[in-house]
Image: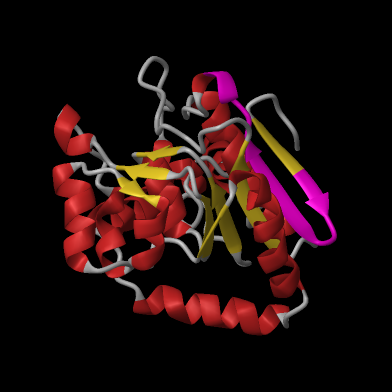
Amino acid sequence: MSSSAVTYEAVDQIAIVTLNRPAQRNAINQDVADGLLAAWERFNASDERVAILTNAGDDFCVGVDVKAPAQDFPACVPNVGVRLNKPLIAAVSGWTVGGAVVMVQMADLCVAADTTKFSFPEAKVGFTGALVAGLAARIPHKIAMELMLLGEVVGAERAYQVGLVNKVVPRDQLLEAAMSYARRLAANAPMVLALLREFVSEVLPRGPSEVAAHGRLAIARVRQSEDAKEGVASFKAKRKPQFKGK
C-alpha cells in the first residue's frame, strides 16, 4: 500500500508509515485517514515485526484538517480503529497537535526531535472528540490536565521529563533513533512482545470516548462484512446462509 497522503515502506522487518502532506503540515483529511487505516491493517497482516509512524516535512501533524476533516478520525488511530498486534514507535517533529497527540499517546514508544511542540487546543476552540482523556493514565495527571484544559504547548524536553516521549534527538537524527529502537524490538521474541502488549492494554484505563469508539467501530465492521451481506441476501432468497467469517 502506498498513496500520496500516507506511504508504507518495509525495511528489515520494520514498517515505516509516513504522513505525507507536508504542504498542509500533515493535517488529517479523508485521504490521510484512509491511508493510515490501510497501513495498520497491512502491518497487522504482514511479516514486519514493528512499525514506525513518522512525518514528511517539518511538522508531524497539526491534527484533523479543519478545511476538509476526515469523517471518522478514531478509525485511523492506531490501537483504536485497528488494534495493533505488534509494537508501534512514533517518531515526531515540529508541531504535534490535537489528534496527533492522541496518536503519540497510543504508540508504545516515542522519539521526538528537539523541535517538537505538543499542543492539544480543543478547549480553546470549543470542540473535542475526547480520545485524549486516556493520556492521564500515561503521564502524570496534573501535566495531562495542563495540556488538555489549558491548551499549553509542551516542548520536547518537558515531554521527555514527564514520560510522554522516550528520547529527544536532533531533527536530522530522528528516523535513525527510531530505527535503532525498532531493530532492537524486531530482534526480540514476537510472542513475548505480543503478550506483554496485550496485558498492558488490560492495565491502562481507557477513556469513555475510546471505549465508545472501539464498540462503534467493531459493530460497523460486522455490519459492513460479507457475512452481513450474505445474511440479507439469503433472507431475501429464502435459503440457508453460507457464512465465511469475514
Residue pictured at 34% horizontal, 58% vertical:
158
State the residue in front, 84 or 189.
189
Q: Nearer the viewer, residue 23 or 224?
A: 23
243 shown above or below 98: below
Quadrant in which residue 49 is drawn: bottom right
Q: Name the residue furthest top.
A: 67
Q: Is residue 141 left or right of residue 16?
A: left
Question: Residue visible at 21% across and 48% down?
Answer: 148
Residue 69, image x, y percentages: 40, 23
Q: Is residue 15 magenta?
A: yes
Is residue 46 in sight in this rendering?
no
- Quarter of the image with the N terminus is top right
The prevailing secondary structure element of the residues shown in magenta is: strand
Q: Is residue 92 above or below residue 137?
A: above
Residue 118 appears in the picture as rendered: yes
Q: Measured along the vertical axis of the image, is residue 159 above or below residue 60? A: below
Rendering coords of residue 106 (x, y %): 44, 58
Q: Which residues are magenta?
A: 9-23
Q: Residue visible at 62% across and 79% down? A: 193
Q: Is residue 29 left or right of residue 63?
A: right
Q: Residue at x 28, y 69 (%)?
A: 137
Quarter-of-image position of residue 70: top left
**Residue 122 highlighted magenta (yes or no):** no
* Residue 150 percent coordinates (x, y): 14, 44
* Corner quadrant of residue 140: bottom left
Q: Residue furthest right?
A: 12
